[in-house]
């Protein structure tokens, strides 16, 4: 039986990492919520952002928290172009056809990263990486704290965008009623492109933050995609708050399972949680029950 | 059926039967992989193509068939023909449990797909911790002499597996043809097209969706048994990997979802694309790791952009006129 303060430390670390997971899942949730497209290439976009951060940091000797802004903008552009040129043409196609399209994109992304960066794990170096804050008996890693704070700010911006801006409201209109949005003359396709760009920048910021905590390999993409699914479904697919709650829940359960069962079994706990939520509350914890 | 079709069937039959005698070892292994994909694709197609239930976790059933029969053979010396039934029974029970829970709790569409992925991943990690099957270190089947044929224990040269899979693929094609033309098939199509309407017509949708899952899981597990005895080594990371599940769904979607020949055409086309890309890259001297998969992904993208309904439907229209849909 591990000591109580160790358990609390692990739970806090899981909570902080979970907020970063939540931001990643938020991107997935926004894309699904608006366009009903399941982004099977989400984790692959995340590893791409992680690599972009690693290289920007070492090439220009910048801090990841500075690199965050250009990476987010770059991924917004990438997401916008991807949706405008390719995915928009598949919006009305059946689910399995969309699945195949995004799977093809994911395959290209994973292997292009393998070609470009090689199979080795990469990470970023910062001089505060090993710092920790002592809070009574608790030890909290500084990077996790900063990363979680940044994830909260980024999520707050996304929520504010959807709640207060006219464009955000228009996108929500498209999500609620595709045909109605077209009837009143909203540029639906452009709004979709904006949405995918926004989802991509969420995952990009999450990637930039996560690479502070874990190293990146090209093959990690599919596992992150899966993690994203688990989180959004636990939280409620299409719900912004749900993505964050799901992220925190999965982050903490991973930490606790790693401590009590075995590190290799930690994702088993997440999958068990997912199966449980799917069966008891298919719409997710914070999702609307139809 | 016109003369061209009969001629095409005749030529393919001769090619299929004489293949092990004329091609190299490597080409035969590719042919076996293709037959495997055609066979499991056909099995998956029953669930998604016929009954409209999207499973992205079919590696689960392959793995259960493979592991159960393989472990029984290794530890207890039980012949694969008996182990096969045990493997099928376990896979069917798992499929039935997942299906029943999902349908009972109205988990549909994307949610159902994610449930199937989660079940497969859950099982993968479970097998990683199962000592009886070797855990992550893998399960190894006793390799006997590859020259002598021992049908009883499924030990023999690759050609034996080739013919066995060919027979299975054809038998499954026959089974699916019969199912699709029977009452069950029409019920499935009704459920796929409009489930509430099917229910309103009095079709017991839960029972027939369950039947689709059970048939699909059973056939997939059989494929797993043969793969276990062909490959002789099983690792949870490989057998239950999400990539394996995705591999299974590609051929029927590329070939033509819900069609009878789609999975077979898809498997052949995908193999040719993959092998063709390898050969071309080798010739060009560009064998970077990942290059092949990037090109494969691009080809997949092009195919799905221009032929969203698959390759087989337009060919079938050309061959036999627009009326026949199989």
Image: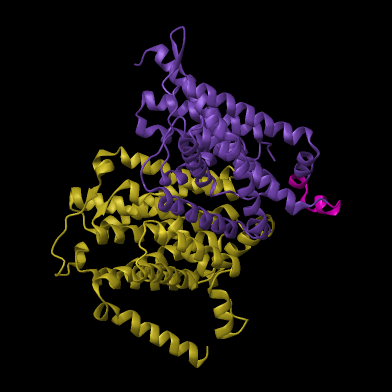
Chain colours: A purple, B yellow
- Seen in the picture, residue B307 relative to B290 is either above or below; the reply is below
Residue A15 placement, left or right of A220: right
Which residue is most to the top?
A: A136
The magenta stretch is A174-185
Residue B220: percent from left, percent from top: 40, 59
The C terminus of chain B lies in which quarter of the figure?
bottom right
- The one of B16 and A17 positioned closer to us in this rendering: A17
Residue A11 placement, left or right of B225: right
Residue B226 placement, left or right of B265: left
Residue A28: percent from left, percent from top: 60, 42
- The one of A99 and A65 positioned closer to us in this rendering: A65
* Residue at horizontal 70 percent and vertical 50 percent from the top: A192
Is most of the magenta stretch helix, strand or loop?
helix
Total number of numbered discs in the rendering: 0
Note whether residue A184 is visible: yes
Picture quadrant of residue B164: bottom left
Q: Is B41 a magenta residue?
A: no
Note whether residue B58 is visible: no
Which residue is most to the front?
A: A60
* Residue at horizontal 36 percent and vertical 65 percent from the top: B36
- Seen in the picture, residue B267 relative to B69 is either above or below; the reply is below
Picture quadrant of residue A170: top right
- The one of B300 and A2 positioned closer to us in this rendering: B300
* Residue at horizontal 48 percent and vertical 33 percent from the top: A61
């Amino acid at each position: 039986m591990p000591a109580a303060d160790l358990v609390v430390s692990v739970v806090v670390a899981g909570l902080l990492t979970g907020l970063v997971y939540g931001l990643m899942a938020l991107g997935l949730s926004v894309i699904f919520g608006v366009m009903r497209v399941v982004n099977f290439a989400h984790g692959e976009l995340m590893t791409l952002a992680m690599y972009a951060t690693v290289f920007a940091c070492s090439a220009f000797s910048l801090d990841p928290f500075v690199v965050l802004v250009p990476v987010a903008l770059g991924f917004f552009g990438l997401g916008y172009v991807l949706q405008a040129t390719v995915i928009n043409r598949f919006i009305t196609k059946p689910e399995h056809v969309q699945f195949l399209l995004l799977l093809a994109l994911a395959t290209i992304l994973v292997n292009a990263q393998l070609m470009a960066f090689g199979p080795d794990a990469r990470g970023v170096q910062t001089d505060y990486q090993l710092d920790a804050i002592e809070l009574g008996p608790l030890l909290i890693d500084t990077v996790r704290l900063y990363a979680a704070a940044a994830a909260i700010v980024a999520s707050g911006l996304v929520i504010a965008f959807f709640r207060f801006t006219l464009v955000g409201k228009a996108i929500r209109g498209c999500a609620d009623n595709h045909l109605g949005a077209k009837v009143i003359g909203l540029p639906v396709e452009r709004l979709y492109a904006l949405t995918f760009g926004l989802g991509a920048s969420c995952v990009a910021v999450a990637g930039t933050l996560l690479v502070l905590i874990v190293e990146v390999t090209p093959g990690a993409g599919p596992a992150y995609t899966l993690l994203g699914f688990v989180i959004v479904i636990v939280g409620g697919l299409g719900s912004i708050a749900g993505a964050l709650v799901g992220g925190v829940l999965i982050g903490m359960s991973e930490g606790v399972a790693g401590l009590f069962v075995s590190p290799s079994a930690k994702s088993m706990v997440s999958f068990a949680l997912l199966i449980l939520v799917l069966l008891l509350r298919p719409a997710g914890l914070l999702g609307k029950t139809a | 059926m016109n003369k061209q079709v009969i001629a095409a069937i005749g030529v393919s039959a001769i090619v299929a039967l004489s293949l092990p005698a004329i091609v190299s070892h490597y080409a035969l292994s590719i042919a076996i992989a293709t037959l495997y994909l055609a066979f499991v694709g056909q099995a998956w197609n029953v669930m998604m193509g016929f009954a409209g239930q999207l499973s992205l976790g079919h590696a689960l059933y392959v793995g259960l068939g493979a592991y159960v029969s393989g472990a029984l053979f290794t530890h207890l010396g039980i012949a694969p023909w008996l182990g096969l039934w045990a493997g099928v029974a376990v896979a069917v029970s798992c499929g039935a449990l997942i299906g029943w829970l999902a349908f009972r709790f109205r988990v549909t569409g994307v949610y159902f797909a994610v449930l199937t992925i989660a079940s497969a991943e859950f099982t993968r990690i479970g097998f990683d911790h199962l000592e009886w099957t070797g855990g992550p270190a893998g399960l190894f089947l006793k390799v006997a002499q590859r020259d002598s044929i021992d049908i009883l224990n499924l030990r023999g040269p690759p050609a034996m597996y080739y013919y066995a899979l060919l027979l299975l693929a054809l038998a499954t094609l026959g089974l699916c043809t019969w199912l699709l033309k029977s009452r069950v098939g029409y019920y499935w199509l009704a459920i796929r097209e409009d489930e509430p309407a099917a229910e309103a017509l009095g079709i017991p949708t839960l029972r027939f969706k369950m039947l689709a899952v059970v048939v699909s899981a059973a056939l997939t597990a059989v494929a797993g048994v043969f793969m276990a005895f062909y490959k002789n080594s099983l690792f949870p990371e490989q057998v239950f990997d999400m990539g394996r599940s995705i591999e299974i769904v590609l051929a029927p979607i590329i070939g033509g979802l819900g069609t009878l020949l789609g999975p077979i055409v898809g498997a052949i086309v995908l193999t040719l694309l993959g092998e063709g890309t390898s050969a071309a890259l080798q010739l060009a001297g560009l064998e970077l790791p990942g290059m092949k998969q990037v090109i494969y992904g691009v080809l997949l993208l092009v195919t799905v952009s221009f032929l969203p309904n698959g390759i087989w439907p337009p060919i079938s229209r050309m061959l036999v006129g627009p009326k026949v849909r199989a």
